[in-house]
Image: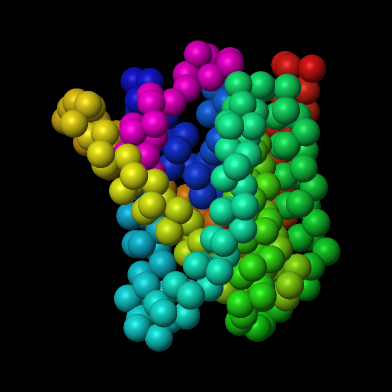
Amino acid sequence: MEKLLLGIVQGITEFLPVSSSGHLVLLKHLLGIGGKGAFYEVFLHSATFVAVVIVLRDRIFNRSAFWRYLWLSVIATLPLFFVVPFADTVERTFENPKVLPFTFGATALVLLSTYLVRPGRRRARWYDALVMGLAQVFALLPGVSRSGTTITVGLHRRLDPDEAFSLSFWMFLPAALGSFVLELRKVGDVALTPWDGVVWLVTLAVGVGSLTFLRKFVSKGKFWVFGIYALAIAILSAFLFL
């Protein structure tokens, strides 16, 4: 049951702009539910990877769109390499729930700021991808939403809402694929069961539903609504951990 709950949380919060890492830290300290090890978390990430491919199939299985988004996502990934020397420092924040009121609060402010944005109509260029990639660096902290920060930056840069959505999740694909490949070497030490397959399918289904739901909200200019939820979680975290 713990694995199933982990899969549902992963499928919902990995894509909705409310921070999956922040929610996992919150669950760990409230209910004693955390990750099941690095490989298992990457195993579930493979389900969310497939969910992105399904939802973005119109941008992935189109030759011209594929190469354009691949190039943009590579540029957006570059800022992450500058964080590698500080990986241990970032990892330690996951053991400290006292950061959650501040990181969830920051996510809330970022999301609420999109209420003031008039939708743009232009396509992303390389410098838009780079700025979105810089914003993605902050999402390494628990409680800071990756999709929230990157889509918000795209909207503020007057990208077409669906363009901002698509590029944000294209940026997710190289990182998720790289993590999965690196962890494959550990598969011999992990015994997966048929129940794990069920959890994977549930994570995939929930992920596809979450992405489809989010895409509609972004296109309708309602992205800011998620900021209300993030603000509520920030306040709850403050009462619990400060």
**Location of residue 61 in the rendering, given as x and y in whole percent from the top left corner:** 32, 76
Q: Is residue 36 magenta?
A: yes
Task: Specify whether residue 138 is in view.
Answer: yes
**Location of residue 79 in the rendering, given as x and y in whole percent from the top left corner:** 62, 58
Which quadrant, please, contains the N terminus?
top left
Q: How many marks?
A: 0
Question: Residue at (35%, 81%) from the top-left corner?
Answer: 62
- The region drawn magenta spans 28-45
Kindly give the residue lying farthest to the bottom in the view shown.
Answer: 64
**Location of residue 210 in the rendering, given as x and y in whole percent from the top left corner:** 47, 50
In front here: 93 or 118?
A: 93
Question: Residue at (58%, 53%) from the top-left corner?
Answer: 80
Which quadrant, please, contains the C terminus?
top right
Tell me: 113 left or right of 224: right
In front here: 220 or 20?
A: 20
Task: Specify whether residue 162 is in view.
Answer: no
Kindly give the residue lying farthest to the right in the view shown.
Answer: 116
Question: Residue at (62%, 80%) from the top-left corner?
Answer: 125
Dominant SS type (magenta):
helix
Question: Residue at (62%, 52%) from the top-left corner?
Answer: 82
**Location of residue 109 in the rendering, given as x and y in whole percent from the top left corner:** 80, 47
Name the image colouring: rainbow
Tell me: 36 left or right of 236: left
Can you tell which quarter of the image residue 206 is in? top left
